[in-house]
Image (cartoon, helix red, strand yellow):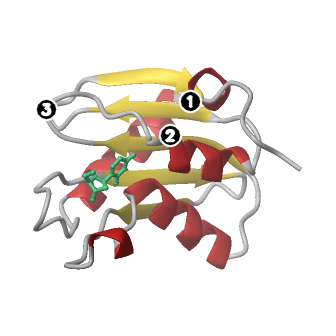
């Protein structure tokens, strides 16, 4: 991937992380997804006093992109805390609905690891 776009995607996730609403875990996550249109959509995690009502940053970003009419994606960046975050199992499955894509996994202090979704979710469920 073009390194300028990669850096934009990671920076968008980093900015989104600052808007996370995580008063219960204090674990803030930001995500950004790159659509085939070239647009980037962002999301942050939000938590709730009723714990199960919260949602991960990656699915918030995916939902924002889908609501804007996007259906094809080439990359996602997610930024977590002290260590590079990898998306949770539900987020991997949610993203896999839209095929394989690059996943940039970053920490708050700048470390970034690169995977493919297929590496992170071998044998994911599909109909
Ligand atoms: N979280 C995410 O936003 N993305 C992930 O991939 C894993 C976990 C959030 C959910 C919850 O608000 C907090 O991190 C701690 O689990």
Which mark is on residue 2? 1
Compared across the picture, whether 59 is left or right of 70 comes to left
Q: Is 57 drawn above or below residue 124 in the view shown?
A: below
Distance from disc 2 to disc 1, alpha carbons, whole Å, reads 5 Å
**Residue 124 lies in what quarter of the image?**
top right
Q: Residues within 10 Å of mark 3 (few under 14, many from 20)?
A: few
Q: Is 15 drawn above or below residue 87 in the view shown?
A: below
Q: Secondary structure at mark 3?
A: loop
Across and down, in percent, residue 69 comes to: 72, 74
Compared across the picture, whether 99 is left or right of 76 comes to right
Q: Residues within 10 Å of mark 2 (few under 14, many from 20)?
A: few
**Residue 46 lies in what quarter of the image?**
bottom left
Q: Secondary structure at mark 1?
A: loop
Q: Residues within 10 Å of mark 1 (few under 14, many from 20)?
A: few
Compared across the picture, whether 82 is left or right of 20 comes to left
Q: Nearer the viewer, mark 3 or mark 1?
A: 3
Across and down, in percent, residue 29 comes to: 27, 52
Sequence order check, earlier mark of 3 and 1: 1
Q: Which residue is mark 2?
A: 5
Across and down, in percent, residue 52 comes to: 36, 70
Across and down, in percent, residue 63 comes to: 57, 69
Q: Which residue is mark 3?
A: 82
């Amino acid at each position: 991937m073009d390194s300028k776009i990669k850096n934009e995607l990671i920076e968008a996730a980093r900015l989104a992380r600052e808007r996370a609403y995580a008063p219960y875990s204090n674990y803030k996550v930001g995500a950004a997804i790159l659509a085939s249109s070239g647009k980037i959509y962002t999301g942050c995690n939000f938590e709730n006093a009723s714990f199960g009502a919260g949602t991960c940053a990656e699915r918030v970003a995916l939902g924002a992109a889908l609501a804007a009419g996007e259906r094809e994606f080439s990359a996602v960046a997610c930024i977590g805390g002290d260590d590079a975050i990898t998306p949770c199992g539900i987020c991997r499955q949610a993203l896999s609905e839209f095929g394989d894509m690059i996943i940039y996994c970053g920490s708050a202090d700048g470390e970034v690891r690169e995977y493919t979704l297929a590496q992170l979710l071998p044998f994911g469920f599909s109909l």
